[in-house]
Image (tube, grey):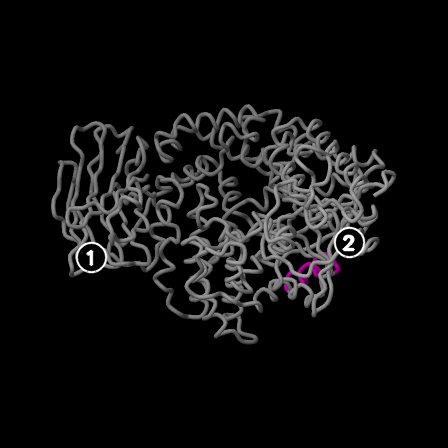
Amino acid sequence: MPTSEPLNVAFVWHMHQPDYRAAHTGAFEMPWVRLHAIKDYLDMVQILADYPDIHATFNLVPCLVEQLEDYVAPGFRDVYWEHTLTPAEELTPAARVFVVERMCERPDHPRARSHPRYLELAEKRLAHLHLGWEGCSRVFTDEELRDLQMWFNLAWFDPEALSREPLRGLVDRGRGFTEADKQIISETQADLLARTLPAYSDAARRGQVELTTSPYYHPILPLLANSDAARISASDTLLPTRRFAHPEDAAEQIETALEKHEQVFGRRPSGMWCSEQAVGEDVIGLLLKAGLSWTISDEAVLSRSVSGSAPRRGAFLSESTSAPHPAAAQTFPYAPYRLKREQGEMAIVFRDHTLSDLIGFTYRSWGSRDAAGDLLRRLAELRTSLAGAPPGVAGPASSTLVTIALDGENAWEYYPRDGHDFLRYLYEGLSSDHSFRCVTVSEHLRESPPDRSLDWLHTGSWIGGDLRTWSGDKAHNTAWDLLHQARDLAASRRGPADPRSAAAWRHVLVAEGSDWFWWFGDHHHTELDHVWDRGFRLHLQEIYRCLGEPVPAGLLLPILEPSVAEKPAPPRGGISPIIDGLIDSLAEWDVAGRLVAELPSTMRPAGAVDVAEVRFGWRSGELCVLVAASHLASLTGLDVEIRVTDQSKTEDTVVGLALAESGRAEVSFVQGDNLSGEVQAAHEQVLEAVLPLAAPGNAAAGYARLAVRIVRGGVTEHAFHSAGLASIGWGGQ
């Protein structure tokens, strides 16, 4: 590669959000499409307009595009926006809890730190978390709640939008907002949402941007085609009970994506970013059949395609020098490769893992100018190294392509000014230095068709070069088995012009999305794990409801085990369960709190029943408790001890329940004098119990702790508690 030749650089920005629309209502349960639109999606493409020499590729996942369209349509709102529009004085107790729990950042988050009033509210919330969510919400005045409603939304706006009127006036005022101020936010975000997709179309028309797509609901294509693919790079992977092998579903996810892209942007794309860059031989055949000309993956997939092992990060360059690594000729990531198969021929590019991750995870903690300068320096060093590479390694300059590919919205979460300054320093540096040329992937392929070939493509993703993130754990496999069962039913009833079967099939495709499986297993967890768990199961439940079939009991219980699920949570509102021991629907327990397991699985006796969860909530001042075993396994023969601590008293309230063979739950003992009536309990599929507790001695503090033990023959099999000194509240009001 002559030193006089520019280095070709391709930025590929991936824009994706899962389908946040509730399975049973279609309403948005999460606000992240809306909030990322006003923060990231529009400005990412608008910034480029100031740097016409910078060409880039944007990948827009169809289910994101569809949700952006919904937000522009009349009447579409998410639950968070509904809670914003509700006047602070009219918030119900449950709604006040929602605002305080869900609509406030941590004090250490940049969005809170950037705005004094928001930080003040975040610190107040932190200072009162020991009261539980209900108690915490009570310490906020109506004015503070209104300011919190405003700041949760206001802080998400792109910084340049915040610097202009009418938002600038709101930012400068900072506090004391009125209900009328919410209309300003509403109108501004509506304008930004409406301009987002047209901005991408315009950029594509002027030739500065290439638009690509992904499979419609972002499924992991190799696992749809054959779930055994999980073992290709990890032979010890635990597989689902039944092999999921439906390449026809993968093909449908691809084809419907191409159709949607053409409908919105006016032409079919040339390239496809397979979800999580998960590719393999089975996938290439499907892409070729769909008429696509290129795809993208990670350098770890390239390395394993050639040598069967993953490279070190940054493997092209030796760690001690700027010279190419000895194995670079075989696993050279800086050029497109040709995949010639029976179905046709297509190209694949491989991202530089190190450079991409520097933007995604490292530079966020740097100063913007320094971060951009470091990336430019690294690119310059790479150009020098390629120019001095031995014959047969780099090839001609025209064929060289450095691909930097990563999420185009999540990367900026912790950057100063949402990454604006970093991107402008970077784009300015690349524009002013003729050593670099920023191209779209298709531009490069047209000018320099691949002259390297891969005879075999490893099945793996951009995470470790394997598929472990979405398959192999117990929770993963339970989810795959439940999906398989529901899909079989939907496929058997699928017919033309049948709206019920069409609706059921859509839920199948949504449930095949990767994001559900991302949160199952041991790799990723958030405080909202239960929301993902429930959302996945609701889509499967809807398949049965659409087709007029009873919902299997296994879909009414969480997939995640207590030790894997989210942290213990207080109730989010009052509940009204029917105490019958049956699971007609867990909806009656949806806003209930959740206890955390304190007994490690390694300490449980052999043969212990697998308890899925213990929930609690308040029904008109009565404490309600639910104990459910995984997959509705029998609880018969167990004893359950429920212990409630009132800090103002020296003796706990303890109720013992014996789960008899007949299915009845009998009160075996009562300790303490804090019960105001008879204990109710029922045991059939689950245990449901109601304790009519008297008001605590210190009503302001409430009952401080709830603990539940599950015992067989005097031996404790499980123990759950409400965690530390966190209040379990009083009365649920």
* Horizontal and vertical percent position of residue 122: 48, 28
* Horizontal and vertical percent position of residue 62: 63, 56
| Category of crowding for the residue at label 2, using alpha-carbon neighbours closer than 10 angstroms: few (below 14), some (14–19), many (at least 20) | many
Q: What stretch is highlighted in magenta?
A: 256-267
Asked if residue 635 is positioned above or below residue 160 in the image, the reply reads: below
Q: Is residue 650 at least partly visible in the picture?
A: yes
Residue at image location 61% in from the left, 57% down from the top: 458
Which mark identifies residue 636? 1
Q: Main secondary structure of the magenta part?
A: helix
| Category of crowding for the residue at label 1, using alpha-carbon neighbours closer than 10 angstroms: few (below 14), some (14–19), many (at least 20) | many
Residue at image location 17% in from the left, 55% down from the top: 637
The residue closer to the viewer here, 141 or 5, is 5
Task: Give the quadrant of residue 261.
Answer: bottom right
Mark in the foreground, 1 or 2: 2
Q: Is residue 299 left or right of residue 634?
A: right
**Amino acid type, label 2:** Ser
Nearest to N terminus: mark 1 or mark 2: 2
SS of the residue at dot 2?
helix
Q: Quadrant of the image for the N terminus?
A: top right
Q: Mark 2 points at which residue?
A: 442
